[in-house]
Image: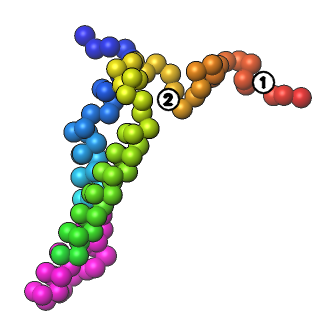
């Protein structure tokens, strides 16, 4: 049976984060291929150049995405990794988010 509130460890699995970085790299490489005209009439050396440039761009996108995710992971307190997440993460602890008093206009 699954838990109603997942822990941060369940939300931030490394395989999923690597998959996200791979998807970003694939997208960047495909955009580079399309923008440099790989699927148009190019000669052999021109096609090789386009493939090399798109692989470099995909590698840069993969590494920069991994570094960005790693820096964001440093913001998480290691003691909170096993605690269940049952409220919005960025709200303060004493916040009464979603109550009727918050929706009333102030005079």
- State the mark number for residue 89: 2
Crowding near the residue tagged with mark 1, few <14, some 14–19, many ≥20 C-alpha atoms within 10 Å: few
Identity of the residue furthest to the top in this view: 1
**Which residue occupies the foreground of this view, 50 or 10?**
10
**Left or right, residue 1 beside residue 65:** left
- The magenta-colored residue range is 27-51
**Left or right, residue 64 beside residue 98:** left
- Magenta highlight: main SS: helix
Of marks 2 and 1, which one's residue comes earlier in the chain?
2
- State the mark number for residue 104: 1
As for residue 78 lying within the magenta part, the answer is no
Residue drawn at (39%, 46%) of the image: 71
**Does 57 appear above or below 67?**
below
Q: Give the quadrant of the C terminus.
A: top right
- The reply to whether discs 2 and 1 touch (Cβ–Cβ < 8 Å) is no
Q: Quadrant of residue 38?
A: bottom left
Residue drawn at (39%, 23%) of the image: 79
Identity of the residue furthest to the right in this view: 107
Q: Give the percent coordinates (x, y) of residue 93.
A: 58, 21
Instruction: Tell me which colouring the rendered structure shows.
Output: rainbow
As for residue 45 lying within the magenta part, the answer is yes
Q: Give the quadrant of the N terminus.
A: top left
**Which residue occupies the foreground of this view, 104 or 7?**
7
Tell me if I can see residue 28 in this picture: yes
Mark 2 or mark 1: which is in front? 2
**Which secondary structure lies at badge 2?**
loop
Residue drawn at (31%, 27%) of the image: 9
Q: Give the percent coordinates (x, y) of residue 28.
A: 30, 64
Residue drawn at (10%, 86%) of the image: 44
């Amino acid at each position: 049976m699954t838990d109603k509130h997942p822990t941060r460890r369940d939300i931030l699995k490394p395989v999923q984060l690597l998959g996200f970085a791979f998807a970003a790299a694939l997208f960047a490489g495909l955009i580079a291929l399309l923008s440099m005209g790989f699927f148009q009439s190019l000669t052999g050396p021109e096609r090789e150049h386009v493939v090399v440039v798109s692989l470099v761009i995909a590698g840069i996108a993969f590494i920069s995405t991994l570094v960005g995710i790693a820096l964001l992971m440093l913001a998480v307190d290691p003691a909170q990794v096993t605690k269940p997440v049952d409220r919005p993460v960025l709200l303060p602890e004493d916040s009464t988010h979603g109550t009727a008093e918050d929706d009333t206009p102030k005079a």
